[in-house]
């Protein structure tokens, strides 16, 4: 599963490389690409925001990525195919709680690339990075009860469904029930060993 590059310079955003992908920092020049996929109502169906309408929506999203990085509460990578600059999705951590070694993971992908294992490849790389470099013990995923593809995606990575959080979020004018999924470091390590032995 590709190589990992961590830039030790604190001012340098860590780059992650997998077999097919480069995960990199999202910058203002990526706003048009982000607007393209985050204006798609299917991509935004479970995102918790209305589909984006203007370039300002995309720039605000990029500002949020920078703010969670500055505040050390999260980090979001842009997903790109090797040899191509276009950002086709994002994946990363939010709501980090360093003293408890836990975080949440979030992701989305342009609909043009659904069904090719790209989200799975990006998610596995980000999870691996989190356990190795951030020393997480627990990574959580909060997923709407109707979002079956996302549930299958995290289950493939070894996440366990722990329960239903009823009316946990109020987004787009409605209360959402969310499933709480978690992946512990020892479970991830065990799964990776199993994959290597196959």
Image (tube, helix red, strand yellow):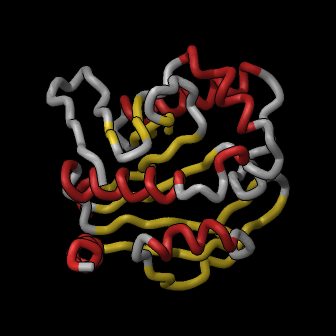
The answer to whether 198 is drawn above or below residue 104 in the figure is below
* Relative depth, front residue between 54 and 21: 21
Picture quarter with the C terminus: bottom left
Image position, residue 187 (x, y; %) = 28, 78
* Relative depth, front residue between 91 and 20: 20
Image position, residue 61 (x, y; %) = 61, 31
The answer to whether 144 is drawn above or below residue 39 in the figure is below
Residue drawn at (28%, 51%), measured in percent from left and top? 129
Residue drawn at (47%, 74%), measured in percent from left and top? 156
Which residue sits furthest top?
A: 29
Image position, residue 51 (x, y; %) = 80, 40
Residue 61 located left or right of residue 195: right
Residue drawn at (75%, 55%), measured in percent from left and top? 171
Residue 11 located left or right of residue 112: left
Residue 141 located left or right of residue 41: left
Picture quarter with the N terminus: bottom left
Picture mark count: 0
The quarter of the picture where residue 17 lies is: top left
* Relative depth, front residue between 196 and 133: 196
The answer to whether 72 is drawn above or below residue 11 in the figure is below
* Relative depth, front residue between 128 and 178: 128
Residue drawn at (24%, 45%), measured in percent from left and top? 3
Image position, residue 114 (x, y; %) = 66, 53
The quarter of the picture where residue 30 lies is: top right
Residue 52 located left or right of residue 113: right
Which residue sits furthest front?
A: 198
């Amino acid at each position: 599963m590709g190589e990992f590059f961590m830039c030790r310079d604190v001012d340098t955003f860590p780059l992650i490389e997998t077999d097919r992908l480069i995960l990199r920092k999202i910058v203002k020049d990526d706003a048009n690409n982000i607007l393209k996929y985050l204006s798609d109502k299917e991509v935004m169906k479970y995102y918790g925001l209305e589909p984006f309408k203007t370039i300002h929506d995309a720039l605000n999203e990029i500002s949020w990525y920078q703010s969670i990085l500055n505040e050390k509460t999260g980090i979001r990578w842009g997903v790109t195919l090797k040899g191509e600059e276009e950002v086709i999705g994002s994946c990363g951590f939010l709501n980090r709680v360093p003293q408890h070694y836990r975080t949440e993971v979030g992701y989305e992908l342009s609909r043009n690339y659904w069904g090719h294992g790209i989200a799975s490849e990006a998610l596995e790389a980000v999870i691996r990075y989190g356990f190795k470099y951030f020393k997480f013990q627990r990574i959580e995923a909060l997923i709407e009860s109707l979002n079956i593809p996302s549930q299958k995606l995290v289950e493939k990575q070894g996440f366990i469904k722990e329960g239903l959080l009823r009316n946990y979020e109020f987004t787009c004018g409605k209360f959402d029930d969310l499933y709480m999924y978690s992946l512990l470091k020892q479970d991830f390590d065990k799964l990776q060993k199993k994959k290597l032995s196959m």
